[in-house]
Image (tube, rainbow, N blue to C red):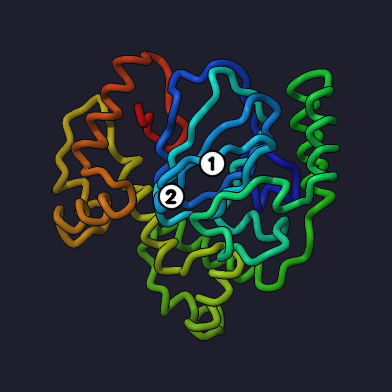
């Protein structure tokens, strides 16, 4: 767990090295953001609107997304990364988060080439993973900046998270003492999406986490338990976020479990292959 005040922005800092069990991952929209400093061979990312994949040598910054991304690993990978809360990248970005929505960028594009080259060199020559995680945490602490409106967005987003997206946006703006327009503007600036979009993402993510791939699924019960009007509404929302039907998603999860027993996927990415 990162130390305060990073713990209010970041879920975890991790180190990844070796041969991944999958060549490509589909990353559906989720209530999270991602920062990766790459130390190995380049990886590739294809956004939903792109025809071609783009190569990322130094790493990447991915804010809250509205569409699935395809993430391609090299044969062997080595990186240090940060799983970030939806609002957590804002204090480290020189631009509004909305400019990066569904547009992954390199770390150089955010922090500049000289600074990132120095950081990557220090990480690559660190004695071990623990020291590397500490170095990245210290870099984040050093870059932490005051961000207007962050308290408002963090509180409102936390209510959406606690209710799995069921809280009424209008009620949240009234409780915060701001207009719905002001709240939506701040959300776009600091998270990259509107409150309504974040609520939809929390709701779908909660529904997906309720799926046990090893057990029979009653899709109607799951949909109503997650607060969807009916199973058709859930299916439409699922396809809009992932490009897959719920049953196709379940098939992919079950195939992965068969092919990689004992391995768990972080969150709800899916192997593309």
Pointer 1 residue? 54
Q: Nearer the viewer, residue 224 or 195?
A: 195
Tell me the SS state at disc 2.
Answer: loop
Packing grade of label 2 (10 A; few <14, some 14-19, many >=20) is: few
Disc 2: which residue: 50
Answer with left or right where residue 95 lies relative to residue 48.
right
- The correct choice, above or below, for 209 with respect to 223 in the image is above
Which of the pair 63/227 is nearer the observer? 63
Q: Position of residue 134 (x, y in %)?
A: 79, 33
Residue 128 at x, y = what percent? 78, 19
Query: Rounded to the nearest whole Å, what is the CA distance between mark 2 and mark 1?
Result: 9 Å
Q: Position of residue 80 (x, y in %)?
A: 68, 32
Q: Residue at coordinates 61% horizontally, 65% vertically from top-left? A: 190
Residue shown at 50%/83% (left/top)?
181
The spot of residue 155 in percent (x, y) is 57, 65
Quadrant (top left, top right, bottom left, bottom right) of the C terminus: top left
Q: Quadrant of the N terminus?
A: top right
Which residue is outermost to the front? 52
Q: Is residue 50 left or right of residue 41?
A: left
User: Is residue 32 visible in the rendered structure shown here?
Assistant: yes
Answer left or right for 68 relative to 81: left
Taking the image as drawn, is residue 154 in sight?
A: no
| Mark 1 crowdedness (10 Å alpha carbons): few <14, some 14-19, many ≥20 | some
Tag 2 and tag 1, C-beta contact below 8 Å: yes
Q: Callout 1: helix, strand or loop?
A: strand
**Measured along the vertical axis of the image, is residue 211 above or below residue 86?**
above
Residue at 18% x, 62% y: name it: 229
Residue at image point 79% right, 46% down? 113
Q: Which label was assigned to residue 184?
A: none
């Amino acid at each position: 767990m990162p130390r305060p005040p990073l713990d209010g922005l970041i879920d975890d800092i991790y180190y990844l090295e070796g041969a991944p069990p999958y060549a490509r991952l589909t990353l559906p929209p989720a209530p999270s953001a991602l920062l990766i400093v790459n130390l190995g061979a380049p990886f590739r990312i294809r956004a939903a609107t792109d025809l071609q994949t783009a190569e990322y040598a130094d790493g990447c910054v991915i804010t809250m997304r509205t569409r699935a991304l395809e993430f391609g690993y090299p044969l062997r990978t080595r990186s240090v990364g940060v799983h970030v809360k939806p609002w957590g990248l804002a204090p480290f970005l020189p631009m509004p988060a909305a400019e990066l929505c569904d547009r992954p960028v390199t770390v150089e594009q955010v922090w500049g080439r000289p600074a990132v080259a120095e950081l990557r060199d220090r990480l690559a020559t660190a004695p071990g993973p623990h020291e590397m995680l500490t170095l990245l945490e210290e870099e984040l602490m050093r870059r932490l900046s005051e961000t207007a409106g962050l308290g408002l967005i963090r509180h409102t987003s936390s209510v959406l998270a606690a209710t799995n997206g069921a809280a009424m946006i209008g009620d949240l703006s009234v409780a915060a003492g701001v207009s719905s327009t002001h709240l939506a503007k701040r959300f776009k600036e600091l998270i990259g999406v509107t409150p309504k979009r974040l609520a939809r993402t929390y709701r779908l993510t909660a529904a997906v986490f309720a799926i046990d791939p090893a057990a029979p699924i009653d899709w109607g019960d799951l949909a109503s338990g997650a607060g969807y009007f009916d199973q058709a509404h859930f299916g439409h929302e699922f396809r809009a976020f992932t490009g897959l039907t719920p049953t196709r998603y379940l098939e992919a999860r079950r195939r992965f479990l068969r092919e990689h027993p004992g391995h768990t996927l972080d969150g709800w990415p899916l192997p593309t292959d």
